[in-house]
Amino acid sequence: MVSLMKNILVIDDSISIRQVVSMTLKGAGFTVYEAVDGRDALAKLTSIDKVNLIICDVNMPNMDGISFVRTVKSDPTYENYKFIPIIMLTTVAEEDKKLEGQKAGAKAWIVKPFLPEKLLAAVHKLIA
């Protein structure tokens, strides 16, 4: 039997946001991995077997979300993740930042605070 379990990497420097997002996703049947910033996430990508989707904050220490997205989409080290959909989950609502994220390769932009059902709808749409 083929497993329908999908793996999602959640990247946010806020432990409370990671917990809320993880609970929401786990409650919907997803396996969740967590990272505290972009640099931590890049390290985790090299050790996780398969990731189907990434949810990433924008403002984080060490490596911000947009730099993370650019790296995943362009660095040959992360070739296996080049086409993985990325949702930006952030307090940033400015159009120029959204455009920058879109150009980097983000597929969706959700502004915090967020409704869990809105997040799940975006997740299901991107990895259905």
Image: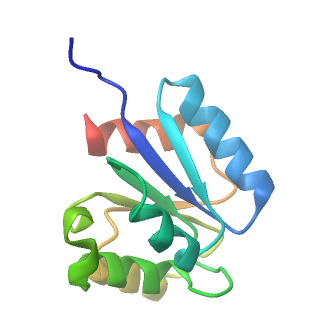
Give the percent coordinates (x, y) of residue 83: 19, 62
Which quarter of the figure is the C terminus placed in? top left
Q: What residue is at 45 percent from the left and 86 percent from the top?
A: 67
Give the percent coordinates (x, y) of residue 30: 47, 31
Q: How is the image coloured?
A: rainbow
Q: Can the viewer see residue 93 in this picture? A: no
Give the percent coordinates (x, y) of residue 39: 54, 79
Along the line of sight, the residue nearer the viewer: 91 or 39: 39
Q: Can the viewer see residue 5 in this picture? A: yes
Q: What residue is at 42 percent from the left and 57 percent from the top?
A: 54
Of all residues, the one furthest to the front in this rendering is 47
Left or right: 71 in relation to 15:
left
Along the line of sight, the residue nearer the viewer: 6 or 21: 6
Q: Judge whether 97 appears above or below 38 on screen.
A: below
Along the line of sight, the residue nearer the viewer: 81 or 123: 81
Which quarter of the figure is the N terminus placed in? top left
Give the percent coordinates (x, y) of residue 19: 73, 45
Left or right: 32 in relation to 12:
left
Q: Which of the 4 image quarters holds residue 94?
A: bottom right
Left or right: 123 in relation to 36:
left
Q: What residue is at 23 percent from the left and 84 percent from the top?
A: 74
Along the line of sight, the residue nearer the viewer: 66 or 5: 5
Q: What residue is at 27 percent from the left and 78 percent from the top?
A: 77
Left or right: 33 in relation to 68:
right
Q: Judge whether 10 appears above or below 103 on screen.
A: above
Of all residues, the one furthest to the right in this rendering is 16
